[in-house]
Amino acid sequence: MSVRSVFREDHELFRAQVQRFIAEQILPYYDRWEREGITPRSLWRAAGAAGLLNCQLPEPYGLGGDQGHAACVIEELARANCLGIGFSIHSDMVSPYLFHYGSPRVRDTWLPAMAKGAAIGAIAMTEPGAGSDLKAIRSRAELRGDHYLLNGQKTFITNGVNADVVVVAATVAPELGARGLTLFCVDMRLPGVSKGPPMAKIGQHAQDTAELFFQDVQVPLDCVLGEPQRGFDYMAEQLAGERLAIALRAAASAEGMLAQTLDYVRQRKAFGRHLIDHQNTRFVLASAASRLAMLRAFLDQCLGQQMQGTLDADTAAMAKLNATEIQGQVLDDFLQLHGGYGYSSEYGIGRAWADARALRIFGGSSEILREIIGRAL
């Protein structure tokens, strides 16, 4: 890979540290976690001790780095074909909500613990009847003196089984649609909170995903994130960073699988020749490498803007749309080059192919992103 100017020397030193952590603490055990359907809490504590969590937040809430450090963690996990590790949801989505909009008690209670891996975060937006359509959210919070009474159900919640703290979107004014949404920091130990069993998925099996239920949960007033009825605005503010994080995962996953596929076609023979010696193989790989090179240049530009605080929502939508669509297309090509072995569990391409499918759905489906981009034209 060519030198990427968006990263400084301290970023690359940190990247090497992340790579060592993955090699020592994740890869030897990842297949077992895939079978078990969850990542152990011990991994989170180890990641916290190694400085891999809350990279972009200042001390004592995080590493004291920036989005470049966070990108190193996102990319290296994806490049190593470990899309089932839920660090990015925790560090790059939940923690910024608590840091930017949380009360002093919320920040001091949760963020240092999250940085250490002693507490695990999740974000609960999606409901059985409301995915990308935020105005369809039915979870409701009613003001009752010194607390809100929260009721509702959330589904497809990443880190849901492990979660200690959850950012929950609920409406306090249903008649206002999306403008009635409010964000809450919910301690999962509160009475009335319950979790469903791990949800069965076609990919990302090591990532614990669950339904969450809230029945008459008393949420203290200082656990409202920001101001009531500003939830939609806060989600819009954070979406650019969240979508860029997904785009970075998608691109690094595809790059990792390109390298693995190159190794495979140089060794595997068909009709008396190595696969790489067949023109069709070279054309497929050349097309993929060219598309990924262009994607990488665009994403590094977006990352640079994010580090400067200038990345806009429409550009981030383009980044996620392009990255996840290209990832799906090239991984399908790579699996085809593996032949029958691509459909087996012997090689990582099958897992990467299945794991990648979700990236075109969450964080705004490809169809929603096309609508957003089209409206901006």
Image: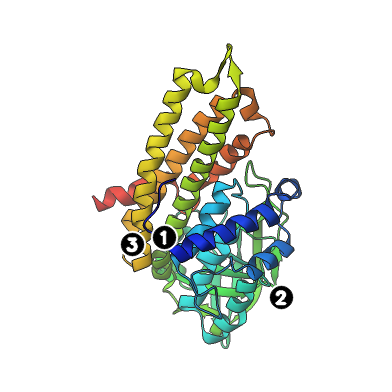
**Distance between the alpha carbons at the discs numbered 1 and 2:** 45 Å
Circle 1 sits on which residue?
7
Name the element at disc 2.
loop
Position above or below: 261 against 239: above
Circle 3 sits on which residue?
305
Locate residue 29, reporting x and y percent. 73, 50
- The crowding category of the residue bearing disc 2, from other C-alpha atoms within 10 Å (few below 14, some 14 to 19, many at least 20), is few
Locate residue 262, reporting x and y percent. 53, 32
Position above or below: 49 against 277: below
Write the residue at 46% across / 68% down. 174
Q: Do the residues labelled 2 and 3 touch (CB within 8 Å)?
A: no
Numbered-mark total: 3
267 left or right, relative to 318: right
- The crowding category of the residue bearing disc 3, from other C-alpha atoms within 10 Å (few below 14, some 14 to 19, many at least 20), is some
Q: What kind of residue is marked 3?
A: Gln
Q: What kind of residue is marked 1?
A: Phe
- In primary-sequence order, the first of circles 2 and 3 is 2
Residue farthest along the bottom direction in this orientation:
146
Q: Nearer the viewer, mark 1 or mark 2?
A: 1
Q: Nearer the viewer, mark 2 or mark 3?
A: 3
Q: Which of marks 1 and 3 is in front?
A: 1
Write the residue at 34% across / 67% down. 308
**Distance between the alpha carbons at the discs numbered 1 and 3:** 12 Å
- The crowding category of the residue bearing disc 1, from other C-alpha atoms within 10 Å (few below 14, some 14 to 19, many at least 20), is some
Circle 2 sits on which residue?
191
- In primary-sequence order, the first of circles 1 and 3 is 1
- In primary-sequence order, the first of circles 1 and 2 is 1
Write the residue at 64% across / 60% down. 159
Position above or below: 78 against 303: above
